[in-house]
Amino acid sequence: MDFRLNEEQQMLQDTVARLVRGEYSFEKRLEFSETDAGFSEDFWKQLGELGLTAVPFSEELGGFGGGGVEVQSVMTELGKGLCLEPYLQSVILAGGLIGQSGNDSQKEQWLAGIAAGELKAAVGLQEPQSFYSLNDVETRAEKNGEGYVLNGRKAVVIGGQCADLILVSARTAGSSRDSDGISLFAISPETAGVERRVYPTIDGSKGCDITLTNVQVGADALLGNEGQASNAIEYQTGRAIAALCAEAVGVMEVANELTLDYLKQRKQFGVPIGKFQVLQHRMVDMMSELEQARSMAILAASVADEEQSDERRRILAAAKNVIGRSGQFISEKGIQSHGGIGMTWEYNFAHYAKRLVMINHQLGDDDFHLERYATLLQAS
Amino acid sequence: MDFRLNEEQQMLQDTVARLVRGEYSFEKRLEFSETDAGFSEDFWKQLGELGLTAVPFSEELGGFGGGGVEVQSVMTELGKGLCLEPYLQSVILAGGLIGQSGNDSQKEQWLAGIAAGELKAAVGLQEPQSFYSLNDVETRAEKNGEGYVLNGRKAVVIGGQCADLILVSARTAGSSRDSDGISLFAISPETAGVERRVYPTIDGSKGCDITLTNVQVGADALLGNEGQASNAIEYQTGRAIAALCAEAVGVMEVANELTLDYLKQRKQFGVPIGKFQVLQHRMVDMMSELEQARSMAILAASVADEEQSDERRRILAAAKNVIGRSGQFISEKGIQSHGGIGMTWEYNFAHYAKRLVMINHQLGDDDFHLERYATLLQAS
Amino acid sequence: MNMNYTAEELAFRDEVRAFLDEKLPADIAAKVKGFRRLSKQDHQRWQKILTEQGWYATHWPEEYGGVKWTPVQKHIWDEESCRYGVPRSIPFGVNMVAPVIIKFGNEEQKQQYLPRILSGEDWWCQGYSEPGAGSDLASLKTRAVRDGDHYIVNGQKTWTTLGQHANMIFCLVRTNTEVKAQEGISFLLIDMNTPGITVRPIITLDGEHEVNEVFFEDVKVPVENLVGEEDKGWTYAKYLLTYERTGLAGIGLSKAALSHLKQLASRRLKNGRPLIEDPAFSQRISQVEIDLTAAAISNLRIIASVEGGGVPGAESSMLKVKGTEIRQAINDLARRALGPYALPFVEEELDLSYEGEFLSDENAAPLSAQYFNNRKLSIFGGSNEIQKNIVSKMILGL
Amino acid sequence: MNMNYTAEELAFRDEVRAFLDEKLPADIAAKVKGFRRLSKQDHQRWQKILTEQGWYATHWPEEYGGVKWTPVQKHIWDEESCRYGVPRSIPFGVNMVAPVIIKFGNEEQKQQYLPRILSGEDWWCQGYSEPGAGSDLASLKTRAVRDGDHYIVNGQKTWTTLGQHANMIFCLVRTNTEVKAQEGISFLLIDMNTPGITVRPIITLDGEHEVNEVFFEDVKVPVENLVGEEDKGWTYAKYLLTYERTGLAGIGLSKAALSHLKQLASRRLKNGRPLIEDPAFSQRISQVEIDLTAAAISNLRIIASVEGGGVPGAESSMLKVKGTEIRQAINDLARRALGPYALPFVEEELDLSYEGEFLSDENAAPLSAQYFNNRKLSIFGGSNEIQKNIVSKMILGL
């Protein structure tokens, strides 16, 4: 039993950390956030050049076959910098879905580009009515001579505003919330009938809703077998949950450091406010929540690339539940300990606080995952 | 709008307070608890002689037609003394059920005795499988020539160990959890086939489970119309909830006083522990919970004797939910603030703490009532 | 014990309702109910209507144009206001500086300032907090040095709510550094147009411009703008802070927010059913509704006690803590009800005149921002920690 | 990063399981798993079996009959123990006084006491707390005055766990009142049969006799019973307190309690269905299971770090707080699962030989009592407030 990173993993993490420290100051991040892309094209390019976007891919694709722990190392450091790049969407989710479901020609066409950071992909798995349930798919794909015609709407596609390729789920059979009958299509946002409504997100990123109106795609746009995408979607979402947990831990680490520093520096009534016992105990609680979150991120990383099982499902649901609660706790208590300053745009803490709460709205919040865990609860 | 007691109500409350102060010291209570009856027969007699057991009954029965507020005044003071007498069971619940459902001859036979404190009654509405749902009745009553034959088991009948009369619910029609088909019978514990398993409760009171084996009762044992008891049971349980909330407020008041005193007296590291900010804020939280509880007890009292309605149901469920949570909070935090001493048998705080948690197990706990409230939730 | 309104109070409620039915502009009410931004003009338009009705200054003496409502009348007004979507009154003039001027100001000050508050000519803001002094107000550093007929003011104030709209500011300034912290403070009224004053926006984490920093550089303030005596400002400040504390619990606002939440949860779907029918979510809503019910009764108990001649003490502090926790819990649930749509921040939908398609729900746009913005509730107006300190000392004697 | 056991560790686990399968008496395991009372004889019987196996003193040097388990081995033992229903080891001899004697005692003391701890001849208890000194240990008042070859001890100790069974007590006593509080304390070993010692039970709120007061009236203690140097006892006391802290989180015990809770919830009914299938209750169980999973990993991380040569620091304090909160939450749910049957306290059912019908559930009888009893978890062993103070100072530097 050993929870230390091995030398390679440590090097990987150090590389990302150095890059983020160098390129991703708070001020720069605010600028990146304001661009049309919503992130730094340059930083993304560097991630690609250093092989970091290739981490989870096989060696043939220029990667080094990294698993959950390697992804964790990258994501935690990206989290510390509140980085806005579509690593989760393009590398983990889209890359994972194509890797798992794509045929050889699809992999050849897209994976190397994604691994190199040259192709940016996004995923549209949610819909306006779906809440967090990825089986709640009303978008329909009807077969015709040339392939499929898609109609429907995909909701809150983070990174969709700048994606070269978008994977969307659509129903080829079954009714609204069946897990069977869901298919996965890779579409170019330039295809006729694809309309994007782009918006900023409250945590400084960007995304879009995508309306599909009689979108004609070829048969080669279908990823995997028709109607059988839900397993891959669930599995890859699981990997993404592990990655998101790792990001969250990075965010929480910085949030707690900032709060702790503030407690030591800020004076009221002639003493640093960190001398007040209520604030001390609250800070301990925040550290304790971080430890719980860190443990679950580690556990999630350890099962992320394992074969699917109820145990994997349980762990990932548990991890996302813990991360959601810890994140909100650290966000809210951190603001409270800072007082007004913790709520200002110009001070970085506020942005960490917002990201933490919003992570809870990606891939299912703590309530959603608690409910999911409960359905998988073993009687003894 | 005026939340003060009127002169009569204040006198009533003062009378009970004086009696409790005089007769119900902590040491005496421990003795009463150890007796077979599980309470003080003498104190009960005094309650009767002073007309206090008659409070909610009409003037013809020797009472003064007291409503929710009058009952509240009595119960709060009994709560302060952790009094063990079966006021809730006999006066409020049994008295209420007979008053609502009984025919003239039944009222004549029993109510005056209950009002005078001469007849002690108890109610058996719960069953081993029922959890807190009073419609979950499996005890059956079959009609025969002489009346009814009862078979089944009633669970946790507080005060049943010494009752002269026990009201039990039994099913005359319908299946397990139907609200229709429940009837109410008044039986003497001396009837053949009635067996009581008596036990102490962890909060110092006594109760029993009652097994009914081919218990033959006359047709005159039926209270109200056959199969239609569930409304009366729900209504009177509502009155009892209001009374129990009032008791709980009395218990919480003393619990908080004891904790506050302890914070002022107990020294650690050279200062009273009440100088530690964490303990100060916790004490404020305990006071704040008490205020929430007090507000709900008042609100519950104000609807206890109103006509049944969803609004009454909601308020009573809300009140019991608040009381359950506040009670457990004050109990647990109070123990924690006391440290070890708060857990000892010889110190009165521990007994207040136990009573508060156990009140949550009477007439439905906070979870049960939250669920109930949610089913009655109005959309806007 | 009587929890009902008297016949007079019921009649007053009818009067309030009739007035709001008739006079409250629909566009303003829609903004308030939909948590949209209100402009300075919106506030001024509504104030004018209130002043015409004679209901703007509800606790001033009648001689100054006030109307002396009882605590219960005030409560009825608050309840109905929140229900109808009346804009929150901007308190700095009518509820904060005015009572101080009425109690401690001289006749000239009363004649000069009170009518302008009533008419809406003056928009006041507050100069209390400083960057170095948050909860520790008495440690303030802004200096006012007497120079002939003027004070020369130098320093900085912060968290000045809506200072960007204001033409007047009341300030606590240090006039004496030789005495104990609380003893050398004075209470000054300052025209925001005086040379040397700069207002700088503070943008909050939700992108909102609500608060400001105000800088004073050799600002000349006529001595007649001193309220009461020099160096006695701390007394007036405390009076102001204890004045009108019950409102801080925001019970009426929580009721409005809860009603909004329930409507939202009736429209949003989960597994094809309205979210409000989801067992877990409906229990979460229920729990906060229950807690709010209890807090509302606690609020009424305080009001009734004040009506009966009592003084609202530290109970108000406890209720402030509970009330703000409840409102934050409602905001949390509203954000949760949006699911993935909590992320998009679609600013154009904040505008009531927006005519496009709503991204998710007509009332979704402000909700995440509001959740973050309302973290302030437990910080401003005396942080919840300070409130608990007060209760510890004042009620509990710890 | 590797979360799995090594082959050696797995082999050790097999060995542990084989041992427990063979040697753990079924009646004792049943008592432990059903939360029944254990007698002194139960403890002694089990200790004998452990000593025979050579597994009783798992961190003593081998020269004294110990076996040096690694932190991971120790963890495996704890996990399996809890799963099998091994009685908690009574720590006062083997885990508390023994390490102090080994590190600070003289050779004679080692020869005299260690074998008797191993054999079970001596049952030790702890004389640390005093009525006036709870968390503030250094303020203790029990005096020991040198008189020739003896100390004369006067004073009172409290919260002495299982002191009613003990024949030996180790005490902190004040030998010097002229110096600072922590400097005049000595560490004495005292025979409980010495004249002048009285043990008085403290009954806890659940009716249990687990702790005691111990009174000392002119008790003569030979000077050779002093450990280390006079007036230096505080150092030894601190050593003892920091020794073996990870165990306090009670992760294994929580796992056993959770498994027990799930079984109980599978048998108890609500609306005719097993309670564990009730949406709200199953979510409550799930939440605590999730939190326990996280805490268990945190525990492993600390163990692995100690195995790797690290020192368990204030992380153990954080884990102690979290772990005790979790166990208390499980106890809370178990009591809730009983519904109305949380009230009856049917003592006869606590006896394993009870052959009558169970009032509600075969494991119901101890549950409410246990809920109350385990409020101690956040009080004893350094209260959770003290643990947070430690973390504030030691890790956070506040």
Image (spheres, coloured by chain):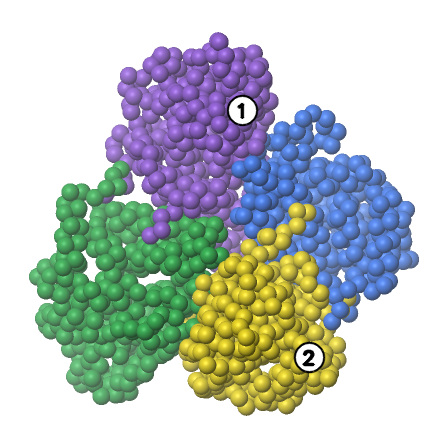
Chain colours: A purple, B yellow, C blue, D green
Toward the top, the furthest residue is A146
The three-letter code of the residue at mark 2 reads Asp
The three-letter code of the residue at mark 1 reads Thr
Which residue does the numbered mark 2 point to in the structure image? B104
Toward the front, the furthest residue is B145
Which residue does the numbered mark 1 point to in the structure image? A139
Looking at the image, residue A371 lies above or below residue C301: above
Tell me the residue at 26%/73% (across/down): D353
Position of A108 with respect to C5 (left or right) is left
Tell me the residue at 70%/86% (across/down): B62
Q: Secondary structure at mark 2?
A: helix
Q: Secondary structure at mark 1?
A: loop
Looking at the picture, tell me which residue is in the foreground, D114 or D365. Answer: D365
Looking at the image, residue A323 lies above or below residue D274: above
Residue B192, percent from left and from top: 46, 81
Tell me the residue at 79%/56% (across/down): C76
Position of B104 with respect to D238 (left or right) is right
Toward the left, the furthest residue is D63
Chain at numbered mark 1:
A
Rounded to the nearest angstrom, the CA distance separating label 1 from label 2 is: 68 Å
Callout 2 environment at 10 Å: few (<14), some (14 to 19), or many (20+)? few
